Amino acid sequence: MTFPKRPEIGSNTLAVIVSLYLLAVGNLTFWRRAVEGFGVGPVFWGFALMVAALFIASAIAVSSRFLAKPIYIFLVLVSAPAAYFTDTFGTIIDRAMIENAVTTTSGEAKYLVTWQFGLHILLFGILPSLLILWVRVRHRPFFSKVIYNSAAVAALLLAAGGFLYSQLGAVVVTIRENHDMLEIINPSGPLTSAVNYSLSAYGERNLVRKQIATDAHRGPWISAEQKPVVTILVVGETARSMNFSLNGYQRQTNPELQKLDVLNFPYATSCGTDTAYSVPCMFSIYPRDAFSKRKAKATQSLMDVVRRAGVDAYWWDNNTGSKGVADLISFTSLTGEKDPVSCARGDCLDSVFLKRLDALVGAAKKDTVVVLHQIGSHGPAYYMRYPEAFRKFQPDCRTPQLTNCSIDEVVNAYDNTILYTDHFLASVIGILKKHNQTAAGAFLYMSDHGESLGENGLYLHGAPYAIAPPEQTHIPMIAWLSPDYRNLSSLDDACLKQLPGRHYSHDNYFHTVLGLMNIQTTVYKPELDVFKECRNIATGHTQ
């Protein structure tokens, strides 16, 4: 058997082919955004030639005998998955998205790594890489190559610089109005983000958490109470405010909560657009405008303050972890439970919390805070987040490949997750009601971020906050306070009814929880405690 003769190609010719391949196949979303920004005209074509010149110059600069093939193959293999997620879901592969990819679990990843993803990687990543590996590359002698390549790179950079100089105003205005355009250039955007994440992770490896609220202690009214106060903090996942019927959504997605005496806050916003950012921010002493993940890793969290005040603190997780928030308290992951009902399909429904919660509240002897970190409405496999009994809105998308479904089918599946979250939250409140004779219960639900369901071509979440649509930042916030809790904390009912019309955010979370548990400390900011003024009306003094 004879094999076909390996074709031979010049090193610079290969550099041009690889550059044009990456631009054409790996940057469909980038070119669409560029057309939207510039329009189809002389400026756009000049911009396209400038980008092509920069790509080719970069490829020629590394086209040496031992570097060219490994680097070109690496770029193609990076470009293929990045292009898939950007073109399919509108995902921007920025630093936050790199961190999400690094910290995701196998259970979460399996819904993203579909057969369509595998086929895309095969056709646009592996096969082109094998072609690059197969061809023979012809290189000039060393000194000739240095001179020739340097001249080619200089000419390309000069051409790119000339265009930029001549159209600087148009380019700057367009990029300013389309903030994410440069971030989605593939593979330079993902590679830059990966380098930034790696450098950041390396710099944070030896961080030591600074203690905060070392003076934290339980205040007078909670210390005087004969039965324990149990507060349940439900950290929602991917729930967006606009799909809650409590907030005016036309579909009935909250039939159980609307029958309860809940306080619903329709004007709440998140700190970030992904779990890895929002969850640490929620439990951080820093407000969003001063927050960074580095600060969160270097500073103790709300749960550490709760524990320091002598309150039992638990974090139960049906998601991808606490993102560092619960490192110093009791942490339990329920994602691997063998519950035959809640976990029958592999992934656990949020009902996995309920039996354990019922037992804990019933046996509570001390003031307690329990965090329930939901799987909630996490996509793209929305259909896995609710049982058959909650398939109210049909036809619902039954695949994680959302672009294979109509927008209506995606929304139906998502709305079913909200309907099930409604049932779950009502069940949590039901447990607190059940044990009202032995524990005074309080409940606070707030989602970490929202979700895009195909609006403007965007799916899922994680858009840079500066350009994130409201679907990803407007979140539900709901509280329930038992009659016993209201009495012992002297909350004024008339005042409480005035609160839902106001605007709140994750900035309020830290101080509101301290207020709920009557934890006194100098770091507490009463102006950020949602319920503070209603407590003051009834008692005539601060917390």
Image (tube, grey):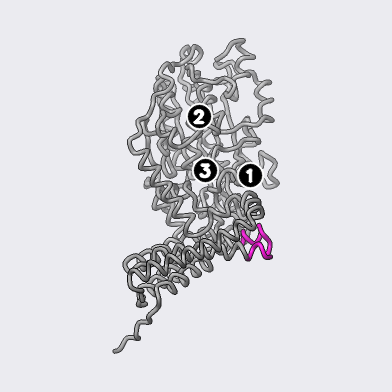
Q: Amino acid at mark 1?
A: Pro
Marking on residue 237: 3
Q: Nearer the viewer, residue 117 or 371?
A: 117
Please identify the quadrant where the N terminus is shown: bottom left
Residue 407 among magenta residues:
no
Spatial CA distance of label 1 from label 3 is 16 Å
Where is residue 7, by image quadrant? bottom left
Depth order, front residue of 431/139: 139
x 63%, y 51%: residue: 172
Q: Position of residue 310 (x, y in %)?
A: 40, 19
Residue type marked 3: Glu
> Please, is residue 231 above or below residue 131 in the view?
above
The image shows residue 249 at horizontal and vertical percentages of 68, 44
Q: Is residue 23 left or right of residue 217?
A: right
Tag in front: 1 or 2: 2
Q: Residue 493: give its label.
A: none
Q: Nearer the viewer, residue 534 or 4?
A: 4
Picture coordinates of residue 507 (x, y %)?
56, 30
Can residue 408 be seen by looking at this rendering?
A: no
Which numbered disc covers residue 470?
1
Q: Which portion, as a residue range, is magenta? A: 32-45
Rendered position, 336 above or below 220: below
In primary-sequence order, the first of circles 1 and 3 is: 3
Residue holding disc 2: 286
What residue is shown at x 45% (from left), y 16% (from top)?
A: 218
